[in-house]
Amino acid sequence: MRIRIAVLSVLVGCSASVKPAPSAGGDGTSPRGATTAGSPAGSAITAAVAPAAPALSAKVAPVGERAKLLRDASEYLTKAAVALDAGNRNLAEQLFSTAELIVGAEPLAELAPLFREGAPPRVTTPTAKIDPSAPKQPDVAGSSESEDEAAKVPPPRKIGSLTGTIQIDGKAGGAYGLVTLEPASGKWKPRKPRRGVIEQRGREFFPKLAAISVGSTLSFPNFDTVFHNVFSTSPAAPFDLGIYKVGEARDYTFTKEGIVRLGCNLHANMSAYIAVVAAPHYVVSDESGAFAFRRLAPGKYKLRAWSTRSTTPITQEITIKPGANEVAIGVAADAPAGPPPDKFGGKRG
């Protein structure tokens, strides 16, 4: 098999770059969910690949350890090639990524395009260490007014408030949502980009919905004892953060307005949304659909609203008068049900 020949030549030619096998974590789960024994290859695969090693002296023991890592990586790459030939691109890429964890990305760089063509662009910046004692993120996050208050931005001289509920197919509740307001004049000062967090904890994303201004950067820390692979195929921000373990994080900067759906390529049940907003005013709703703006300048606005059960936002005109204002907003429940597709667009679940 041509891919296998290339695999072996790459491994032999670049064996000096072999890394220690990554730890499986507290529950012993590998990137593919297999039980492990000190490396992501797993005891069953390792037993099939590697014959019983003879006892080695302390002087040459590192040679035996490196040979074992190379055998493990070779087995993963061979299985990746078989999966690719069978048309299972997602499994093939997972297996290839596991081999990268063992030997590093550089020795396998020439093979990477074979396994990643058709996937979102890969983010290869180094991971950063995280504080393992950091508290859990909230279920939803994002309020332009909260940001302004924290930055001590003075409120307008005349103030209007707006409260309301996002109704989905005529019923309140059942999903988180987003409301944005733009001055009808079409003129406003762009908001300052900020930093935020969407974490992987308990095999879930938190927040489930985060609203951020265009140009903001999010960190994606892994607090689990399993590997994760955060990705998005959304047109507003297609990206693939790759596989990384507990205690690590990668960043991504969102430069385009739109709704971004997150998934984990290793855990189909994991899903979250990022609303990248260009409007000067925005807020996320709670799960009942309730939302509130407390410090708006009176005037005419273009209101947009969306829920996690909707495909696209709805738009309507609204006039904010001094004092209290209230509105009920209706959106459709027309988003596809089920987990997000895998990073190649394949259906899961």
Image: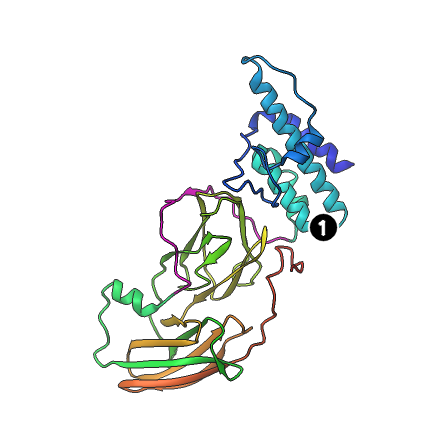
Q: Residue at x 59, y 50 (%)?
A: 266
Q: Residue at x 54, y 79 (%)?
A: 332
In the visual, does 129 lie left or right of 263?
Answer: left
Using the image, determine if residue 273 lies above or below residue 28.
Answer: below
Does the stretch in magenta take in 268? no
Give percent across and percent down for residue 114. Answer: 68, 44
Give percent across and percent down for residue 279. Answer: 39, 71
Q: Residue furthest front?
A: 27
Using the image, determine if residue 232 lies above or below residue 23.
Answer: below
Give the quarter of the figure containing the N terminus.
Answer: top right
**Colour approach in the figure:** rainbow
Give percent across and percent down for residue 20. Answer: 53, 29
* Quarter occupied by residue 39: top right
Magenta segment range? Answer: 119-141
Name the residue tied to disc 1: 88
The chief SS type of the magenta part is: loop
Considering depth in this image, is 216 or 54 the residue closer to the camera? Answer: 54
Q: Residue at x 65, y 42 (%)?
A: 95
Does the stretch in magenta take in 120? yes
